Structures are given as structure tokens and as C-alpha cells.
Image: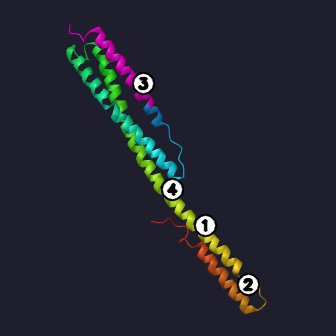
């Protein structure tokens, strides 16, 4: 009967893969928690940066990940195989779990970045529209303030009605409420 390796080697492998799995599980759990979404562009940029840090951390862990995969495969190759040796099966299960979590982290960080970039674009459009709307409101207030008091002369009343209709049309037009392209 072939063995996975020396008991010390097997124990070291399990210790290392167990600590790696715990660390990866913590990362994937954090990524599965939906982030609070801000309407502030700078805050969203910070979230994108934090998300990129997860990817950088994963790249930093890449050598350990690859080494564990290689050692695990070598250990299984020295045994009778994962289907016949329970110890080899345990190693294979941990390797499979590690690969699955690793891939989940990569997928979740890519998805989160895409969503945050979309939200950042919307937030930028929101603030542009907000500024345009605030300017329109200010201009409208100034125009109303410049109107003469109610007149008794029918032609003055008609002119004031036309001015108010123009202001109303301008305010209600979707040109000031539309998101810039």
C-alpha cells in the first residue's frame, strides 16, 4: 500500500491548507456581504480601491495556492488514488474546496468591481443633474423676483401670464431633468 507521504509531511500539508482555507473562507464571506452603496463618487472610488486590494491580496497568495495544489496532487499520486485511499480522498476534498473558494473570490471581486463602476457612473450623472437642477431653480427664483407686481392693466396681466407660462415650461421641460449623456 502506497502512502501519501511521511506523517510529518501530511500533517504539515493539512495545517497549511487548513489555514489557507480559513483565510479564503473569511475573504469570500466578506465579499458575499453586499456593500453599502453611497451616492458620493469619492466613496465609491474608495470601495473600488478596497475591492482591488482583495484582488492584489489574492495575487499575493497565488504562490501558496499553487504550491498547495502541486503538493496535494503529488501526495495523491503517491497513494492508491482518491477513490481507494481515504487519506488521499481527504486531500482531494480539501484541494477541491480550496479551488472552488479561490474561483468564487475571483468571480465575486470581478462582479463587485463591475457593479461599483456602474454605480459610480450613475452617481456622477446624478450630481451633474443635481447641479443643473439647482441652477435652474436659482434662475427661476431670480426671474420670479424680477417680475413686476400684479398689474391692473390687461396687457400687463397678459404679459405676466406669458412670462409665468414660459418659466413653467422651462422648469417642466425634461432638458433640465435629463441625465447628461
Question: For the magenta stretch, what is the residue range?
Answer: 1-26
The residue shown at (54%, 52%) is 40
Q: Which comes sooner in the sequence, label 2 or label 3?
A: 3
Query: Which part of the image, by quadrant, shows the N terminus?
Result: top left
Distance of label 2 from label 4 (alpha carbons): 40 Å
- The image quarter containing residue 76 is top left
The outermost residue toward the top is 1
> Does label 2 or label 1 sit earlier along the sequence?
1
Instruction: Write the residue at 30% across / 18% down.
Output: 91
Element class at badge 3: helix
Task: Residue under label 1, please give it.
Answer: 134
Task: Give me the disc on residue 148.
Answer: 2
In the image: residue 15, left or right of residue 123: left
Disc 2 to disc 1, how far (Cα)? Answer: 24 Å
Residue labelled with disc 3: 22
Residue 178: x %, y % from top left:
52, 67
Q: In the image, 144: left or right of 101?
A: right
Q: Give the structural element (helix, strand or loop) at label 4.
A: helix
The answer to whether marks 2 and 3 mark residues whose Cβ atoms lie closer than 8 Å is no
**Quadrant in the picture for residue 6:** top left
Identify the residue under disc 4: 123
Amino acid at each position: 500500500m502506497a502512502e501519501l507521504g511521511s506523517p510529518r509531511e501530511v500533517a504539515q500539508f493539512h495545517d497549511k491548507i487548513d489555514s489557507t482555507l480559513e483565510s479564503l473562507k473569511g475573504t469570500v464571506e466578506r465579499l458575499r456581504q453586499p456593500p453599502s452603496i453611497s451616492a458620493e463618487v469619492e466613496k465609491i472610488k474608495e470601495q473600488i480601491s478596497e475591492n482591488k486590494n482583495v484582488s492584489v491580496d489574492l495575487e499575493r497568495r497565488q504562490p501558496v495556492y499553487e504550491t498547495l495544489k502541486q503538493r496535494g496532487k503529488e501526495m495523491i499520486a503517491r497513494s492508491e488514488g482518491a477513490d481507494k485511499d481515504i487519506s488521499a480522498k481527504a486531500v482531494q476534498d480539501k484541494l477541491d474546496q480550496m479551488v472552488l473558494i479561490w474561483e468564487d473570490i475571483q468571480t465575486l471581486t470581478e462582479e463587485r468591481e463591475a457593479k461599483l463602476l456602474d454605480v459610480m457612473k450613475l452617481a456622477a450623472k446624478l450630481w451633474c443633474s443635481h447641479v443643473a437642477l439647482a441652477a435652474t431653480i436659482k434662475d427661476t427664483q431670480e426671474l420670479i423676483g424680477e417680475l413686476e407686481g400684479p398689474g391692473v392693466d390687461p396687457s400687463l396681466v397678459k404679459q405676466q401670464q406669458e412670462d409665468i407660462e414660459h418659466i413653467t415650461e422651462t422648469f417642466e421641460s425634461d432638458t433640465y431633468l435629463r441625465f447628461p449623456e
